[in-house]
Image (cartoon, grey):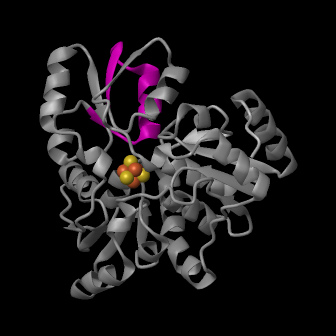
Amino acid sequence: MVLYDDKEMIARIDRLRKSRHAVILTHNYQLGEVQDIADFTGDSLELSMIAAKNSAEVIVFCGVRFMAETAAMLAPEKTVLLPVATAGCLMADMADGEALRQLKAQHPGAVTVCYVNSTAAVKAECDLCVTSANAFELVRNIPADREIIFVPDRNLGGNIIRATGRPMIMWDGFCPTHMRITPAMVQARRREFPAAKIIAHPEVRPEVAELCDEVMSTGGMCRYVKSAPCRELIIATESGIIHRLRKENPDLVYIPLSEQIVCPDMKMTRLGDVLRALETMQPRITVPEPLRERAVLPIRRMLEQSARFAPAQ
Ligand code: SF4
């Protein structure tokens, strides 16, 4: 095996990116070294919009499996690579299609809404997909006389109920990384940095969200800090976002709510994995066509509806 230093690896990635007509999409939670070589870094909504529209022939998705699966469903004619095949999402794996079918049978007529952090088999059972960037608006938009089943994140669901007042039948999933954030941690940071604003991701528990100043997606955080009303910000989400915030707005001070808020799967991908993926064109993510045809529908509905609620850039 030949070992390259980072500079050589980046040069090789750049050459292959051009010759393969590839685009590198990187989630906001990825390691800084991977964010720095990306064509686009963003949250799930931003990256799925790019995957749907981009003209590249190859998408290298630096994130976790459900994200690459979403890209593969939106752009089946493209080659979608997930540099580390085992990078998954524990929350997405907490729901399965068969159990969801059984729940739906108990609530005929309900609108079934899935968080994008779900498998293709779960999406195939759903009417509408949402991300943390658009979930609040899209749920508000569901006719008031319809029951709603929400899968798999009970914390995002709880935060939507808190904000919209819409009752929902909730799946019992959660993000183990965001679950580590407790109300006591928020209160301790607040005492330590009284002038700071605390911004949290809606995957935190509702009782945590209640103690924070703002609750938003990572893409929302990137926009928020551009006109932040303070110099210090406490970040209550996965630590990877701080790399991007610092890079784009270096004059502000970013304090992680806790050093423990790290998703192991989001940290699996290194530069060497991206290079190997481009060299070998593996691991490739595909979704069998009959499943894709059903699972892409709630994602398409989301993209159409969220275009109407897009925040001003
Ligand atoms: S941070 Fe949580 S929701 Fe996001 S990929 Fe990791 S386990 Fe899944």
Asked if the magenta segment contains residue 217, the reply would be yes
Image quadrant in which you'd find residue 240? top left
Q: Is residue 220 above or below residue 277?
A: above
Residue ID at (37%, 59%): 90
Image quadrant in which you'd find residue 196? top left
Q: Is residue 15 above or below residue 296?
A: above
- Locate residue 114 relative to residue 154 in the image: left or right: right
Residue lying farthest to the right in this orientation: 19
Residue 88 in the image: x percent, y percent?
46, 58
Camera-side residue of 87 and 244 = 87
Residue 176 visible in this rendered orientation of the protein: yes
Residue ID at (27%, 27%): 198
Asked if the magenta segment contains residue 89, the reply would be no
Camera-side residue of 151 and 27 = 27
Residue ID at (73%, 63%): 78
Residue 134 visible in this rendered orientation of the protein: no
Q: Which residues are magenta?
A: 214-235
Q: Is residue 264 above or below residue 145?
A: above
Residue 34 in the image: x percent, y percent?
60, 37
Residue ID at (42%, 65%): 118
